[in-house]
Image: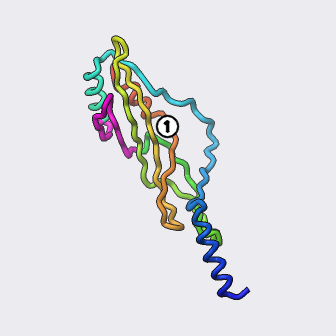
Amino acid sequence: MSILARGRLLTLASILGLGASLVACQPAPSGLPSAPPPARQTTSSLDLEAARATLAERLIAEGFTVERAVGGLHVRTTDPRFMRCPVLQVRSRDRESSQRRLVRPDRTVTTADIRIEEAGPRTRVSWQPTFTGSYLNRVDNIRFEQPCEDTGALAQLLSTALPD
């Protein structure tokens, strides 16, 4: 096969390979057993507005960005203590290359939608968090995001932020 024909085949293979995954990621084995999922709700003796104000104050003091939302709050932080992100192995998207590297996230974001509602004489606070790590594949200079594991620190903070 001529060099020109081989070059055309490699180009065609590269174009067809674009439909495949840009980044191959495999979490490094942690060897730790999975912990039970943390709590996702709590109740307080505070009324609805007092609970919202107290919770917002506490979260701002902990470094969160807090936005009022219908029925509750939307919060965000880049503090890494709320999540554990895996070290991933990335490789070049060029199938001919064997370059591989281990990468850690260089940015982390925890967000949570917090619902605050009346529950009889008490106020119920429930939350739905999302933990995301942002990685840079330095082999191909491609940024990607990956879900991270909850450490339970956010649930602990939210569970204890309001008086019982």
**Residue 72 colored in magenta in the image:** yes
Q: Position of residue 62 (x, y in %)?
A: 32, 37
Which quarter of the rendered picture does the C terminus lie within? top left
* Residue 63 placement: quadrant: top left
Where 40 sits versus 146, above or below? Answer: above
Q: For numbered disc 1, what is the local secondary structure?
A: loop
Q: Farthest residue in the right direction?
A: 1
Residue ID at (34%, 18%): 118
Amino acid beneath label 1: Thr
Where 51 sits versus 94, above or below? Answer: above
- Camera-nearest residue between 10 and 92: 10
Number of residue marks: 1
Residue ID at (55%, 48%): 86
- Camera-nearest residue between 129 and 2: 2
Q: Farthest residue in the top direction?
A: 121
**Residue 100 colored in magenta in the image:** no
Q: Position of residue 93 (x, y in %)?
A: 58, 66
Where 139 sits versus 82, above or below? Answer: below
Side of 69 relative to 148 (left or right): left
- Camera-nearest residue between 39 and 95: 95
Start and end of the magenta stretch? 60-79
Q: Where is residue 125 in the image (x, y as percent from the top left)?
A: 38, 24
Residue ID at (28%, 17%): 47
Q: Would you call the spot at circle 1 few (<14 residues within 10 Å), some (14-19), or many (20 or more)?
A: some
Which quarter of the rendered picture does the N terminus lie within? bottom right
> Which residue in the structure is indicated by mark 1?
151
Q: Which colour scheme is used?
A: rainbow
Side of 41 relative to 10 (left or right): left
Residue ID at (54%, 30%): 37
Q: Position of residue 159 (x, y in %)?
A: 41, 25
